[in-house]
Image: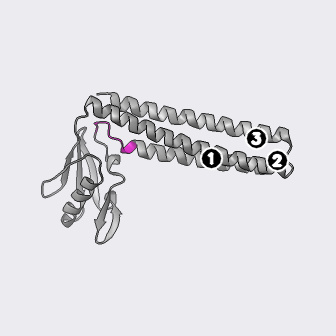
Amino acid sequence: MEEEIQMINEEAKEMMDKSIDHLEKELQKITTGKANPAMLQGVMVDYYGSNTPLSQVANINTPDAKTISVQPWEKAMLEPCATAITYANLGLNPQNNGEMLIISIPILTEERRRDLVKVAKHEGEEAKIGVRNVRHHAIDQIKQMQKDGLSEDNARDAETEIQNLTDSYSKNIETHVDKKETDIMTI
């Protein structure tokens, strides 16, 4: 029984780690007014009939804090890359100079910064929901083990351990969101 409880805890921890990883990826996509190649991470390009990540068909750099340059490995990919960035709904407008795409990161207004903070908080809440779902699943497994003969004290201890794990991950999520909020609101 102890080994099964340990396996439930490890599985819960692994799933909660995935929630944190997903949150970090989503927060990277939120622009803070500073150029970051990660902003283009989710952009998919039509590369000879198949959807391919932009990073696999082009070199992405940040020559300065307000600019991203995208240089496709094939000149024929300039237009498909520009189209993909435009349709990715990131609020970015790539300029084609014949060699590469230049993307100027727009200056964020106060209102836009507040909107981005709301998006970051929403992503944080989604991550917390994921963590709580993992907790719910783990507690259901413990209750099933209790029906199969696990003592009440051991079940309570296991549930407390899962709750403590949930609390620590929730605090971690809040830390990530607070850090992103600070980044967004800093001019």
Residue 146 inside the magenta-drawn segment: no
Q: Disc 2 or disc 3, which is closer to the eye?
A: 2
Residue tagged 3? 158
- Label 3 crowding class (10 Å Cα cut-off): few <14, some 14-19, many 20+? many
Residue that badge 2 annotates: 146
- Residue type, label 2: Gln
Predominant SS along the magenta part: loop
Tell me if 80 is positioned left or right of 143 in this view: left
**Does residue 63 lie above or below 186 as drawn?**
below
Q: Is residue 142 visible?
A: yes
Quarter-wise, where is residue 169 in the image?
Answer: top right
Q: Quadrant of residue 135?
A: top right
Task: Find the distance from the CA under tag 2 to the CA under tag 1.
Answer: 18 Å
Residue drawn at x 47%, y 35% is: 176
Q: Residue 127, percent across and down?
A: 52, 42
Q: Callout 1, which amino acid?
A: Val
Magenta stretch bounds: 28-34
The foreground one among 76 and 151 is 151
Residue 1 visible? The answer is no
- Answer whether labels 3 and 1 touch (C-beta < 8 Å): no
Label 2's element?
A: helix
Q: Is residue 95 left or right of residue 116?
A: left
Q: Secondary structure at mark 1?
A: helix
Q: Position of residue 98 (x, y in %)?
A: 12, 58
Q: CA distance from mark 2 to mark 3?
A: 11 Å
Q: Residue at x 78, y 37 (%)?
A: 157
31 in the magenta segment: yes
Residue 68: give x, y in percent of width and height.
24, 46
Task: Measure the alpha-carbon separation of dots 3 and 1.
Answer: 14 Å
Q: Amino acid at mark 3?
A: Ala
Residue beneath disc 1: 134
Residue 122 x, y percent position in the rendering: 44, 39
